[in-house]
Image (cartoon, rainbow, N blue to C red):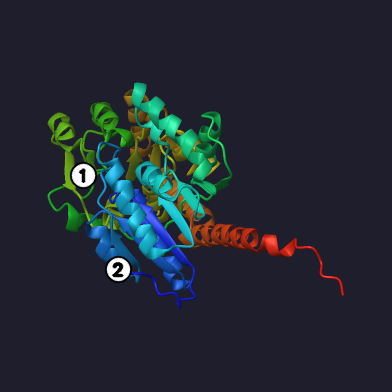
């Protein structure tokens, strides 16, 4: 179906692969704000639950079957995307994460203003030859990005150090502070975990079960936590490729929820939320937990560090891939309820002031206006420089 030529609304095309985890939540929040602002929003993504959510918001959703990582199907995926772009005829393309950024920029090649948002750099996720190839592509593909949007200043610095050129904007992630808000833990915990002693300290980790998020490091730390807090319980919320391996090494005090439609009750049930990532752009889980008034522990990696207010860092940061230090940080907070309460209050104030999704959406809208205005100016510039007509 072709977009009507009489529709005056600016047309934005979002491209996303993956369709689980934090990236599609960012796409969903942007779609909600942009539809409400009067834009014509199309999202191209693989089939899944995300498509129904986006259609319910009023977006035009186009099926784009694509694998999560580059592979032999890439040429077909780029061709499919080129057909979508031809049908939609967007004024601006916004590609989210490495795979959509690769396919999208190959399909567009700078003919339409293209925003690329890495949501953590692909070359940090891999090693060896694969990392070199990913970095080589990011350096080459940057010439087709009208703007590269990073979710943290640290993510931008990583790109610059890696030799990626172009124009940059830093727009921190935001979350819906009305949806993620405090509530009493007791009632929620009784509903979610009726078999667990209500007074047992509860640690919750929300995230895709994958190497990036570091749940394996948390499990290696957990025995040391139990030596100091014997009745503590740990809940891993989410699913992913590491699920079976993590289950094999988990003691009985660790519970797995699998994929959940809504993580809010788990944040509210927690005494402490932990995200032991190996790398991040800026994860949503710590922001969501703080918005719910819960203290967090994150690893001292770029995007995670930047999500905390400076006053919380001494209590809430642990070095990455260090189970001993992580266990000490977790146990210290579990043993100090008054400090946890104070950190929870301060964390929520920080999210309200810095990471409200409305602030993020407004910043993205301003970026779009700048790019579309520049594109329009470039088109009319030749007529402005004609020789004057003399009478």
Residue lying furthest top in this view?
A: 128
Q: Secondary structure at mark 1?
A: loop
Q: Which residue is mark 2?
A: 55
In the visual, does 242 lie left or right of 361?
A: left
Q: Position of residue 119 (x, y in %)?
A: 42, 44
Quarter-of-image position of residue 15: bottom left
Question: In terms of sequence position, does the residue under pointer 1 or pointer 2 come before the other?
Answer: 2
Point 25% across, 30% down: residue: 216
Q: Which residue is mark 1?
A: 239
Q: Position of residue 370 (x, y in %)?
A: 60, 59
Residue 370 shows in the view: yes
Point 44% across, 72% down: residue: 36
Point 57% across, 57% down: residue: 371
Q: How many marks?
A: 2
Residue 295 shows in the view: no
Q: Position of residue 305 (x, y in %)?
A: 48, 38
Residue lying furthest bottom in this view?
A: 6
Q: Position of residue 260 (x, y in %)?
A: 21, 53
Q: How far apart are the alpha carbons under marks 1 and 2?
A: 24 Å
The N terminus lies in which quarter of the figure? bottom left
Which residue occupies the foreground of this view, 107 or 49? 107
């Amino acid at each position: 179906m072709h977009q009507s030529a009489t529709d005056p609304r600016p047309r934005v095309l979002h491209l996303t692969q993956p369709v689980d985890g934090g990236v599609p939540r960012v796409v969903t929040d942007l779609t909600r704000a942009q539809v409400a602002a009067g834009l014509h929003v199309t999202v191209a993504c693989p089939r899944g639950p995300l498509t129904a959510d986006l259609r319910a918001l009023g977006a035009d959703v186009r099926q784009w079957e694509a694998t999560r990582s580059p592979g032999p199907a890439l040429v077909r995926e780029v061709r499919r995307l080129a057909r979508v772009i031809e049908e939609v005829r967007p004024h601006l393309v916004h590609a989210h994460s490495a795979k959509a950024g690769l396919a999208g920029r190959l399909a567009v090649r700078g003919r339409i203003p293209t925003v690329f948002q890495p949501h953590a750099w692909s070359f940090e996720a891999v090693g060896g030859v694969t990392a070199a190839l990913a970095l080589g592509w990011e350096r080459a593909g940057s010439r087709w990005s009208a703007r590269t949007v990073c979710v943290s200043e640290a993510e931008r610095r990583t790109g610059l150090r890696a030799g990626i050129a172009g124009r940059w904007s830093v727009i921190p992630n935001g979350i819906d502070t009305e949806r993620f808000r405090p509530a009493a833990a007791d009632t929620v915990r009784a509903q979610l975990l009726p078999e667990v002693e209500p007074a047992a300290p509860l640690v919750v980790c929300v995230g895709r079960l994958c190497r990036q998020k570091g749940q394996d490091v948390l499990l290696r730390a957990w025995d040391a936590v139990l030596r100091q807090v014997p009745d503590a319980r740990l809940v891993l919320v989410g699913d992913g490729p590491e699920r079976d391996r993590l289950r094999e090494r988990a003691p009985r005090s660790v519970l797995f929820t699998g994929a959940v439609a809504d993580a809010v009750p788990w944040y509210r049930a927690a005494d402490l939320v932990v995200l032991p990532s190996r790398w991040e752009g800026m994860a949503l889980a710590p922001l969501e937990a703080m918005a719910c008034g819960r203290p967090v522990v994150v690893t001292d990696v770029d995007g995670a560090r930047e999500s905390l207010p400076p006053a919380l860092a001494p209590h809430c940061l642990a070095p990455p891939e260090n189970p001993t230090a992580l266990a000490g940080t977790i146990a210290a907070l579990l043993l100090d309820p008054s400090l946890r309460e104070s950190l929870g209050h301060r964390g929520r104030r920080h999210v309200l002031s810095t990471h409200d999704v409305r602030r993020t959406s407004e910043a993205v809208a301003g970026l779009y206006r700048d790019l579309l205005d520049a594109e329009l100016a470039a088109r009319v510039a030749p007529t402005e420089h004609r020789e004057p007509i003399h009478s």
